[in-house]
Amino acid sequence: MTYDEALAFWYGQINYEHKTPKTGDFTLDRMRALVRLLGNPQDRLRIVHVAGSKGKGSTSAMLASILRRAGYRVGLFTSPHLVRVEERMQIDGVPITREELASLLTEVRTAVEAGKLEPTFFEIATAVGFLHFVRRKVELALVEVGLGGRLDSTNVCHPLVSVITSISHDHTQMLGSELASIAAEKAGIVKPGVPVVSGTTVPEARAVIERTCRERNAPHWQRGADFGYEYEAGKEDQEGSVPPRVRVLSTQYSVPSTRFSRHDRDVPPMYELGLLGEHQAANAAVAVAVVERLRAGGLHVPEGAVRTGLATVHWPARLEVVGRHPLVVLDCAHNVASASALVQTLETSFPATRRSLVFACSGDKDLTGIFEVLAPHFQHVFLTAYAGSTRTVPPERLAEILRSAASVPATVHPCASDAWRAARGKACPDELICITGSVFLAGELRPLLVGSTHSLACASG
C-alpha cells in the first residue's frame, strides 16, 4: 500500500480515542490473535510497560532520555500523538518514517485479512510499534498503556519492569468511578514475578496495587515507602527560565523506607529536570526507581546518564513554554488531577500576572470539576472546540458548564485557531496565556504556536 492507502486502512478501524468506548468493547483476544499471526514480535523485545492515570507519557519520555544517554537504542511507544501519527513510534527520539509506517501497515493488513480479524485503531498501532522496534533492533522499549491496563492491547507483552505512575479519576465510564476499581484495571499489567514500581500514594488505590503484587508474587517498590523526592520549583518569566530541580530519595542511597531522613553522607544528587511542575518531580522519582530495577537486572545505566537524561528530557505540550511577551504555556490537562497540577505549577513557577485560558475538552471528562479548579486562576476564558473528533464539547455547552462552576468572563469561539487569535490579540506583553483541556487541542494549535506554516483554518461542516 502507498502511505495514503495505509493510513486510510488504519483510520478506517474503530478508534476509541475519538469515539467514547463502552463496557465490553475491550478484549485481548483480537490483539493476541493479531500478534500471533505476526510472529509475536513483543516477545523479542525488552520492555518497560508503563500505566497510570497521569504521568505515564512523561515518565516514559524520562526513561527513554536516560536510557539513550546510557548508550542504548531505545524505542518509545506513546499515545495519542500531537501533530503527526508517526510520533507514536519513535526510536532514539526519531519518529517512524512514512515509508516504514506504510510498509508495516501493509504487513499488518495482510495478517488482519488472513485471520479475518476486526482490530481497533489502537490495536493496529500497538502491533506496528512492536514490529518497528523489532525490525530496527531496539535494545529497550518504553511502552505506554493506552487506556486502563488489564485489557489494553499493550498488555500482551512480558516486561522487565511494570510501572504504575498514578491513580486518579479518568475514563470512569470504562474503568469505574471508584479509585479502587481504576487501580484494579491499572494493576492488570502486573505479571507474576515481574518487578513493579508504583508512584501511587492514594491509600485505597495503593492497597489494590499492593494486594495484586502479593497475589502475583511481583516485587513492589512504592513511592512514599521505598522512595520519595524533594523538589525545587523552576522559574519562568518573560525573559527566560531557571529549570526545576529534584532530589530522589531511595533505597539506593540507604534512605530509611518510611521517613526519608538522612545523614550528610547519604545525601543523593540534585538533578535538573527538563519538565516543569512538582508532578514531574514525582514522575522523575518513579523513573529513577525504575532505573534502579533495571540496574538490578543487569543493565548498565551510569549516574551521568540519569543526570543528563532528566535535564534534557523534552515532552511537548506538558506545561511547555512556547512563547514570551506574552508568556504562552501549552498543556493538555484533561482531568481534575492534571488541572490541579497545572494550577499549582502556574502559581509556583510563573509570575503573578493577568492570565487568560484557552480551553477545549472531551465530553467524557469531569468538566465541572476541571472548571472549579482552573477558572478562579484566570481573568478570562476563551472556550472553543478541537477539530476532527466527535468527542469535543461544543463551546456553547462549555460556557453553560463554566457559568455553573465559576464566575469568570468567557467568550465562545467556533474553532481553536479563532480562540488563540482572540486570546493573543487581547493579551499585553507582560501577561500569560495558557492553552489546555485536551491533547487534541494542544496538537491542533502547537504548529501555529511554534511558527509552523501549517494551516489551522476552522473545520467546515
Image: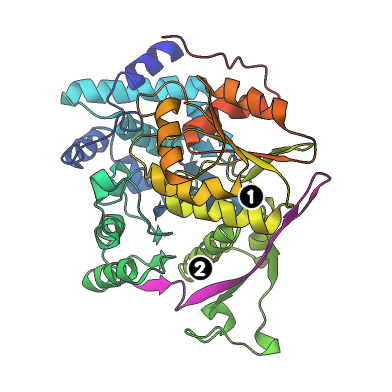
- Residue 63 vertical placement versus 232 (above, below): above
The residue positioned 58% from the left and 72% from the top of the image is 229
For image coordinates 28% across by 23% down, the residue present is 13
Give left or right: position of 3 versus 155. Answer: right
- Give the magenta range: 217-246
| Residue 131, position as x, y percentages in the image | 39, 35
Quadrant hosting residue 4: top left
Q: Residues within 10 Å of mark 1 (few under 14, many from 20)?
A: some
Type of amino acid under label 1: Val
Q: Is residue 221 left or right of residue 212?
A: right
Which disc is residue 324 wearing?
none
Which residue type does callout 2 highlight?
Ala
SS at mark 1 in the image: loop
Residue 313 marker: 1
Work out whether residue 233 can be spotted: yes
- Assess whether residue 122 is covered by the magenta stretch: no
Give the residue pinned by disc 2: 289
Determine crowd level at label 2: few under 14, some 14-19, many 20+ residues with C-alpha closer than 10 A: many
How far apart are the alpha carbons under marks 1 and 2? 17 Å
- In the image, residue 225 lies in the stretch drawn in magenta: yes
Q: Quadrant of the N terminus?
A: top left
* Residue depicted at x 49% and y 39%: 437
> Looking at this view, is 166 or 385 the one in front?
385
The residue depicted at 43 percent of the width and 19 percent of the height is 102
* Along the viewing direction, whichever of 436 and 85 lies nearer the viewer: 436
Q: Which percent across, then down, holds residue 276?
A: 64, 53
Q: Position of residue 329 (x, y in %)?
A: 65, 41
